Image (cartoon, helix red, strand yellow):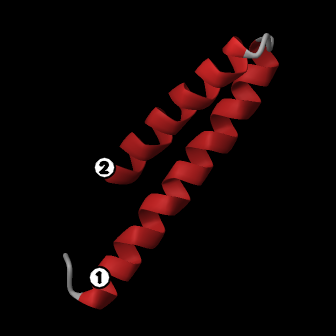
Amino acid sequence: MLTLFAFVSGFIIGAVRAKKSGGNKMDMAQYGAAHGLAFTLIVLVVWVVGGWMGWF
């Protein structure tokens, strides 16, 4: 569930950044997908490292 939230929030942030820089719908989709994947990977890495360190 947390990874889904990270992807959706990253997608929204990426789409807004593309729109601010004058991008069209395809640019918004590309920026959104890239930001969504990056946010998801960050959350997964923190989740795994946190599990190893005993935080979760």
The residue at which mark 2 appears reads as 1
Mark nearest the camera among 2 and 1 is 1
Identity, as a three-letter code, of the amino acid under mark 1: Gly
Residue at disc 1, secondary structure: helix
Quarter of the image containing the C terminus? bottom left
Residue 28 percent coordinates (x, y) = 71, 21
Position of residue 33 measured from the top left corner of the image (x, y, whole percent): 66, 38
Residue at horizontal 71 percent and vertical 26 percent from the top = 29
In this picture, is 25 found above or below 49?
above
Secondary structure state at the residue bearing disc 2: loop
Q: Residues within 10 Å of mark 2 (few under 14, many from 20)?
A: few
Relative to 16, say whether 32 is above or below.
below
Residue that appears at 75% across and 13% down: 25
State how far apart marks 2 and 1 are (Cα).
Answer: 17 Å
On the image, numbered disc 1 is attached to which residue? 51
What is the three-letter code of the residue carrying label 2? Answer: Met
- In percent of width and height, residue 3 lies at 40, 52
Residue at left offset 52%, top offset 26% = 12
